[in-house]
Image (cartoon, helix red, strand yellow):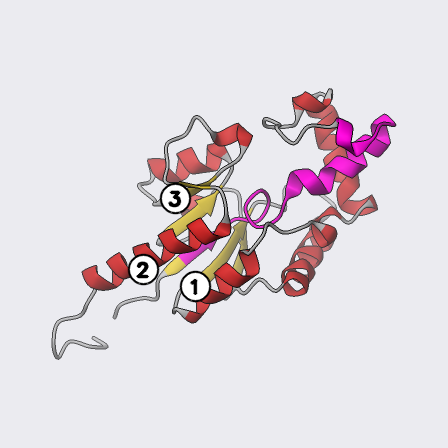
């Protein structure tokens, strides 16, 4: 029996603007105006004048003190696009690697689910996992270069959600959720065409 088309959707840097959410916390810690911090950052935000260790410490504190994952702004049209894909028959599977800080799992999980409800993002299930290739999906959307490369190593189809730190990677690449929606719908069309069951063979 043919399974439903599954779209594996990342959160930070794809659905939610992680940099915009973290910037006020870092600016407060540094005693500067948030506008003094650039949005054009690479991994771990060294452009903000912080080390990898400082970045990780500020991220961990922002989760608890600022409730980073509860108040993160969304990218334009993400809710509308994902609802359209869901209504078209696509199974939305949230796949995120957020449970990597010991002692914060309950807060992170609850804030993530509450945020998804608050911003109106539809989903059928949610997976907190680092090795995203271990989670079955027919198409992924991702910003993390390491995750994109890992998925492609396993011959997974990945849409690159454009960020400064992933621009050396080949596409397909999108800069907004309208573009992502169109690629997902086109991939669904190809999937349905390829997987059309033979006459009389439905539900076998």
Residue 74 visible, this angle: yes
Q: Residue furthest bottom?
A: 200
Badge 2 crowding class, 10 Å Cα cut-off, few under 14, some 14 to 19, many 20 or more, is many
Marks 3 and 1, the one that precedes in the sequence = 1
- Residue drawn at point x = 66 percent, y = 38 percent: 19
Depth order, front residue of 31/113: 31
Cα gap from disc 2 to disc 3, whole angstroms: 14 Å
Nearer mark to the viewer, of 3 and 1: 1
Depth order, front residue of 188/107: 188
Residue wearing tag 1: 85
Badge 1 crowding class, 10 Å Cα cut-off, few under 14, some 14 to 19, many 20 or more, is many
Residue 137 visible, this angle: no
The picture quadrant where one finds residue 43 is top right
Q: Image quadrant for the C terminus?
A: bottom left
Label 2 near label 1: C-beta < 8 Å?
A: yes
Name the spot of residue 109 as percent of width and height, x first: 67, 55
Q: Which mark is residue 25?
A: none
The picture quadrant where one finds residue 201 is bottom left
Residue wearing tag 2: 188
Relative to 157, 127 lies left or right: right
Q: Which residues are magenta?
A: 7-36
- Residue drawn at point x = 55 percent, y = 56 percent: 77
Relative to 136, 101 lies left or right: right
Cα gap from disc 3 to disc 1, whole angstroms: 16 Å
Name the spot of residue 105 as percent of width and height, x first: 69, 50
Relative to 100, 184 lies left or right: left
Name the spot of residue 102 as percent of width and height, x first: 70, 42
Name the spot of residue 123 as percent of width and height, x first: 52, 64
């Amino acid at each position: 029996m043919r399974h439903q088309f599954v779209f594996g959707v990342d959160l930070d840097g794809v659905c939610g603007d992680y940099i915009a959410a973290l910037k006020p916390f870092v600016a407060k810690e540094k005693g500067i105006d948030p506008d003094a911090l650039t949005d054009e950052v690479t991994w771990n935000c060294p452009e903000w004048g912080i080390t990898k260790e400082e970045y990780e410490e500020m991220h961990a504190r922002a989760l608890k003190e600022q409730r980073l994952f509860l108040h993160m702004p969304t990218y334009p049209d993400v809710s509308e696009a994902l609802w359209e894909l869901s209504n078209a028959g696509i199974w939305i599977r949230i796949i995120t690697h957020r449970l990597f800080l010991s002692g914060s799992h309950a807060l992170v999980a609850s804030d993530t689910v509450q945020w998804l409800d608050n911003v109106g993002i539809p989903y059928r299930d949610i997976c907190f996992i680092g090795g995203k290739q271990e989670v079955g999906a027919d198409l992924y959307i991702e910003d993390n270069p390491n995750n994109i490369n890992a998925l492609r190593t396993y011959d997974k189809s990945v849409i690159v959600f454009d960020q400064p730190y992933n621009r050396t990677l080949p596409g397909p690449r999108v800069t907004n959720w309208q573009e992502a929606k169109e690629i997902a719908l086109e991939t669904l069309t190809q999937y349905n065409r390829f997987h059309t069951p033979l006459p009389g063979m439905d539900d076998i």
